[in-house]
Image (spheres, grey):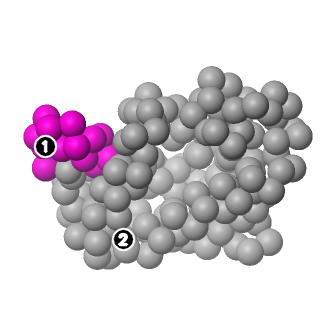
Amino acid sequence: MEVGGPLTKQQKTHIRDTWALLYAKENRMKLGVDIFVCFFTTHPDYRKLFRAFRDEDDIQALAKTPKLKAHAFRVLSAINNLLEQLDDPEVFVEMVKNLARSHHGRNVGAATFNDLGPVLLTSFGKSIGDKFTKKASDAWLAAYTFIVQTMMAEYDVINGEGGSGGSSPEK
């Protein structure tokens, strides 16, 4: 992973070990909803980016809707699919580029993703407590930084500004 720094085997292990806890069936729906509740509470203007959520002013009521639950589940499933490709850098990068292409036309830029990163890390920590160690948090931050940088490079390609669209998530 040249952009955002290399992911070591140890970092991948921290990511996989914590994800196994985070994505456990009994935890995943609550985690997904909690991420969006935290995101929309911390950054209420971003709710406008989501057609299905923009008219609901009560975040706690929104948290109970099937629309938010379904979106939260799709996001966690996308993260899971990405993580399954950590050892296949070309596929990993292509999946990140696809993610960029799907978000490009929705007015979701670097600031949004930069604001989402701390929300994810906070939500992960709240979800699994002391099992989300400093090393695990640092590993997730490295991976997330790479993903966002790769997405923004792909935005540049889409916008005709060049760029390679990212590199590999490996050393």
Q: Dot 1: what SS?
A: loop
Nearer the observer, 141 or 49 = 49
Q: Residues within 10 Å of mark 2 (few under 14, many from 20)?
A: many
Q: At which x and y percent is residue 123?
A: 67, 47
Dominant secondary structure of the residues highlighted in magenta in the image = helix
Task: From this view, report whether residue 3 is shown above or below residue 6.
Answer: above
Q: Dot 2: what SS?
A: loop
Q: Say the numbered circle drawn on residue 134.
A: none
At a point 48% along the width and 71% down the height, the residue shown is: 81
Quadrant position of the N terminus in the picture: bottom left
On the picture, is 36 further left or further right than 154?
A: right
Magenta stretch holds residue 61: no
Residue 146 is at least partly visible in this image? no
The image quarter containing residue 54 is: top right
Quadrant position of the C terminus in the picture: bottom left
| Distance CA(mark 1)–CA(mark 2) | 22 Å
Q: At which x and y percent is residue 152?
A: 29, 40
Q: Magenta residues, as a range?
A: 148-164
Name the amino acid type tagged 1: Gly
On the picture, is 85 further left or further right than 168?
A: right
Task: From this view, report whether residue 98 is shown above or below residue 20.
Answer: above
Q: At which x and y percent is residue 58?
A: 85, 31
Magenta stretch holds residue 155: yes
View extreme (top): residue: 45
Q: Say the numbered circle drawn on residue 163.
A: 1
Kindly identify which residue carries mark 2. Answer: 86
At a point 54% along the width and 38% down the height, the residue shown is: 116
At a point 13% along the width and 49% down the height, the residue shown is: 164
Earlier-in-chain disc, 1 versus 2: 2
Name the amino acid type tagged 2: Leu
The image quarter containing residue 155 is: top left
